[in-house]
Image (cartoon, rainbow, N blue to C red):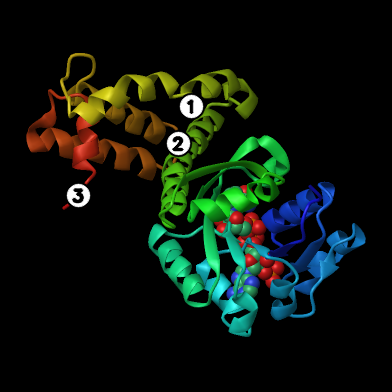
Amino acid sequence: PTPGPVTVIGLGPMGRAMAGAFLDRGHAVTVWNRTASRADALVGRGARLAGSVEEALTAAEVIVLSLTDYDAMYAVLGGADPAALRGRVLVNLTSDTPDRAREAAAWAAERGAAQLTGGVLVPPSGIGNAASTTLYSGPRDVFDAHRATLEALTGADHRGEDPALAALLYQLNMVMFWTALSGYWQALAVAGAHGLTAADLRPLAVDALDLRQFVEFYTPRVDAGDHRGDVDRIAMALASTEHVVHTVAGAGADTALPEAVAALFRRAVEAGHGADSATRLVEVLREPAA
Ligand code: NDP
């Protein structure tokens, strides 16, 4: 089938990559952005710049939203004639909290539009690559009807009907991503204090950041509530995290991050879990620290 028309609203690095991927696949692409000049290169490649949000909305059934957050979405769509939203599919690839995604789906439904929430798991350079993944949630029939269009952007993985689900999974991804990547920045800062470059650290970093074997080992134990300290003990891990704090301090570097990690393990030991596996931290982390 010939690719149908699509509209992309929001032309940050992500929205520009998305509009470009649709053009590459032969879609008729309409774009709108608060700062219209960001559309220049896309218009040069054949995209049509809408003169208003209404015009952008009525140019296609599929409206891809790529904005900073949901406040930006309300700022853009809230000012438009609501009639322009009727019958549209809002493919909301804007990241925000699960609650905000659920509210936005209801907001769309009140105006006769359907929302597909999306969490894009790659940077703009991964757009247009079928091996990349975007997690979607929302009405399955709407997803199925537009799947081929969405696949111009990335692989499309529908995870369920709940509009909040894709936003939740996206945020869970970011919880892990930012925390692990901060550990990488920390290691580079300490390495640098000792005259080691990022290139020097690369082989060690690649292995250290591949936590697959830990994930595979701990998955069944966490789900079974099995926190037996037969392989690792929190008391041992606390000593290890303290060595990290001392090593970072010894390099004259900022210790805020390793202090936070050591404090977490200390909290678990003080709560009487020193002989348990680090999986116990999942329960410790369920409640705010005192
Ligand atoms: P940007 O923050 O650079 O994109 C911002 C877009 O939102 C611009 O088009 C901007 O318009 C518009 N915008 C912001 N506030 C308003 C407002 N109040 N009214 C109207 N328009 C507004 O983000 P990216 O392009 O990098 O990403 C877009 C979304 O994709 C974000 O939610 C991001 O979290 C998510 N994402 C990004 C990834 C990345 O690597 N970049 C990876 C995965 C997800 P203007 O040009 O006028 O400023």
Q: Which residue is mark 3?
A: 287
| Residue nearest the observer in this picture, 224 or 231 | 224
Dot 3 or dot 1, earlier in sequence: 1
Give residue 208's position: percent from left, percent from top: 47, 22
Residue 266, position as x, y percentages in the image: 19, 36
Q: Is residue 287 left or right of residue 104?
A: left
Residue nearest the viewer, comparing 136 with 49: 136
Distance, label 2 to label 3, CA atoms, is 21 Å
Circle nearer the viewer, 2 or 3: 3
In the foreground, 141 or 38 = 141
* Residue found 9% across the figure and 38% down from its top: 271
Q: Are marks 2 and 1 in contact (CB under 8 Å)?
A: yes
> What residue sits 85% from the left and 62% below the top?
47
Q: Which mark is residue 239?
A: none
**Image height check: is 207 above or below 40?**
above
Q: Earlier in the sequence, mark 2 or mark 3?
A: 2
Please indicate whether residue 17 sits to the left or right of residue 279 in the image: right
In terms of secondary structure, where does tag 2 sit? helix
Q: Which residue is mark 2?
A: 180
Check if mark 3's residue and mark 1's residue have beta carbons within 8 Å.
Answer: no
Helix, strand or loop at label 3? It is: loop
* Residue 82 x %, y %: 59, 82
Image quadrant of ligand 1 equals: bottom right
How far apart marks 2 and 1 lie (CA) works out to 7 Å
State the image coordinates of residue 14 (x, y, percent, origin top left): 68, 54
Q: Amino acid at mark 2?
A: Ala
> Which mark is on residue 209?
1
- Indicate the quadrant where residue 240 lies: top left
Q: Amino acid at mark 1?
A: Leu
Q: Secondary structure at mark 1?
A: loop
Name the foreground residue: 8 vs 233. 8
User: Mark 2–mark 3 contact, CB under 8 Å?
Assistant: no
